Image (spheres, rainbow, N blue to C red):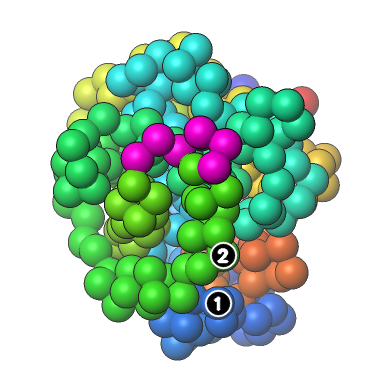
């Protein structure tokens, strides 16, 4: 590898300065609480596999993890049930549609993949536990191990999403009809909404990404958290489905497995090298952070990140 990590702080600071005043995009209104955040928030973090942490901008700013939790929910089920049991309920095909698409695979009626809402709701049903409380304890523990840090929870965003989440509710009941969901849909949605409301910083996300980049061993705590074969499945599905209907262009212009969330975060996994995260709330039509995309695209060029 010709790229020296000594260049990282300068590169991320340059990109921070370049996009600091960029204000394109809109905040999501379908979760009202998310439309109240300050659109100016902007931070970038890179964590290398040696455990070096580099940040630019307001790196202490927390935000809800939203869909960026989906790869980890998927990871929990792969670890606890194995890939065959998970595949029986959730596919691995990209949808070419938005994150909240109400469509299921022909014949099997499974959700297309674990990165769209339908898939993550079905995955939430698979996390072992008697009720949503048991499940959320498992999710919290897994996320904190991945981040090597305790994580807070945003009760306002959670309540806001739970109150307004009828689109996801519709999807859950459709999956109940097809026998994909087997429990009480309201309890399963509860687990899903709660999982989306954990609070992270860009550093937390970059550590989580670096853990995936490091075949499941957290570079900060040095603990093996996910088996390498399951990491392979997670980042493969992130590559093909993590950016929803933007996945093709993302692969073409950035070229690393990544996951976005409607809070404005994106994290990316550069296998064998580093984890990267950007936070900037204003989104494009696909629900992806606009400054996030720009920073990743330029970083990919400057640091030769593409896996292709
Ligand atoms: N909690 C959000 C939802 O279910 C997550 C969507 C996202 O971040 N893309 O709609």
Q: Which label number is shown at residue 253?
A: none
Residue bearing mark 2: 167
Residue 53 appears left or right of 283 = left
Looking at the picture, tell me which residue is in the foreground, 97 or 43.
97
Of helix, strand and loop, which one carries label 2? Answer: helix
Ligand 1 closer than 8 Å to the CB at disc 1? yes
Tell me residue 91's x, y (percent). Answer: 62, 27
The residue located at (57%, 36%) in the rendering is: 178
- Picture layout, residue 53 above or below residue 130: below
Ligand 1 closer than 8 Å to the CB at disc 2? yes
Q: Nearer the viewer, mark 2 or mark 1?
A: 2
User: Along the polypeptide, which appears first: circle 2 or circle 1?
Assistant: 1
Q: Which label number is shown at residue 30?
A: 1
Residue 129 seen from this side: yes
Please state, as top left, top right, bottom left or bottom right, where the N terminus lies in the image. Answer: top right
Question: What segment is highlighted magenta in the picture?
Answer: 177-183
Q: Are marks 2 and 1 in contact (CB under 8 Å)?
A: yes
The residue located at (45%, 87%) in the rendering is: 36
């Amino acid at each position: 590898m010709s790229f020296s990590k000594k260049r990282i702080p300068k590169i991320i600071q340059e990109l921070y300065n370049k996009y600091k005043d960029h204000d394109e995009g809109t905040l999501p209104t379908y979760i009202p609480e998310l439309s109240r955040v300050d659109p100016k928030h902007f931070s970038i973090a890179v964590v290398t596999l040696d455990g070096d942490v580099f940040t630019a901008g307001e790196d202490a700013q927390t935000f809800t993890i939203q869909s960026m939790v989906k790869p980890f929910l998927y990871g929990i089920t792969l670890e606890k049930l194995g890939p065959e049991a998970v595949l029986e309920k959730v596919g691995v095909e990209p949808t070419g549609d938005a994150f909240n698409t109400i469509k299921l695979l022909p014949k099997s009626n499974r959700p297309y993949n674990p990165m769209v809402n339908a898939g993550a709701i079905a995955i939430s049903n698979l996390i072992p536990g008697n009720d949503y409380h048991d499940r959320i304890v498992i999710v919290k523990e897994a996320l904190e191990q991945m981040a090597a840090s305790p994580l807070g929870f945003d009760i306002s965003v959670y309540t806001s999403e739970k109150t307004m989440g009828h689109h996801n509710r519709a999807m859950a009941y459709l999956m109940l009809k097809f026998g994909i969901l087997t429990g009480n849909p309201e309890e399963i949605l509860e687990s899903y909404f709660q999982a989306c409301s954990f609070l992270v910083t860009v550093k937390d996300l970059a550590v989580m990404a670096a853990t995936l980049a490091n075949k499941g061993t957290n570079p900060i705590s040095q603990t093996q958290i996910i088996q390498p074969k399951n990491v392979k499945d997670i980042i493969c599905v992130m590559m093909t489905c993590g950016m929803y209907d933007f996945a093709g262009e993302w692969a073409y212009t950035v070229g690393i497995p990544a996951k976005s969330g409607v809070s404005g975060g994106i994290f990316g996994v550069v296998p064998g090298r580093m984890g990267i995260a950007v936070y900037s709330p204003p989104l494009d039509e696909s629900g992806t952070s606009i400054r996030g995309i720009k920073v990743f695209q330029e970083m990919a060029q400057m640091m030769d990140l593409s896996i292709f």
